[in-house]
Image (cartoon, rainbow, N blue to C red):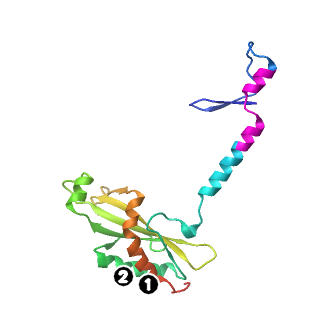
Amino acid sequence: MILVFEPSAIHFIPFPPHNPGLSEKDSMMTQPSASLLCVIMILLSLLTACLTQPVASSGGIGSVTVRNSNPGAIIAAAQNFFPRYGYTPAFGGDGISSVSFDKNSNQLANVLWGSYGDPQTIRVKVKIVPIPGTNDYRISPKVYTVSDRGEAGFESKRALIGLWGSEFGLLLKKVAAQASGSGAQ
């Protein structure tokens, strides 16, 4: 069986193509061998396995591990610290595995995101992910810019690239420090 790779799809040909100018030995030399394909598949599997990471180190830039805690304590700590930096609780988190906070952005942000008449809002969604086999949790920020906040049917939310999450690393470390040690619920 020969695999033919085309830009549109992969087709399986049940018989080798016949080229009258090549002998049978020469035509076999131009086809990739089964052992080469096996080696490529094994390497791809290993590469994929190397790219996965455990929950304890996941979440991207700005993520923090909270030791020996529970979601209630993490949310309470976040609700304690985020308002100190001008953020207000927002809808968008489910209150168990995430919580959200909003803050009005400045004029420069309005120009950057093309919102000249309506002020932009920065929304931070703090995701809470349990680390299996422990009482530890990984909290990570997901940052959005929101247009027309609070207007039913017109609110528009765009995710910002991962580097924005680094802005919340220190704040999440304070949340983790307060919530750590509160034990399982």
Can you see residue 70?
Answer: yes
Which segment is the magenta one? Answer: 25-39
Query: At 54% across and 68% down in the image, what residue appears?
Result: 57
In percent of width and height, residue 8 lies at 57, 31
Identify the residue at image location x=36%, y=60%: 144
Q: Residue at x 39, y 74 (%)?
A: 170
Q: Label 2 neighbourhood size at 10 Å, few (<14), some (14-19), many (20+)? A: few
Please identify the quarter of the rendering in which residue 25 is found.
Answer: top right
Question: As drawn, which residue projects farthest toward the top?
Answer: 20
> Could you tell me which quadrant the N terminus lies in?
top right
Q: CA distance from mark 1 to mark 2?
A: 9 Å
Query: Camera-side residue: 57 or 123?
Result: 57
**In the picture provided, is 180 more to the left or to the right than 101?**
right
Compared with residue 129, is residue 19 higher up or lower down, i.e. above or below? above
> Does residue 92 show up?
no
Image location of residue 69, percent across then percent down: 52, 82
Residue named by callout 1: 178
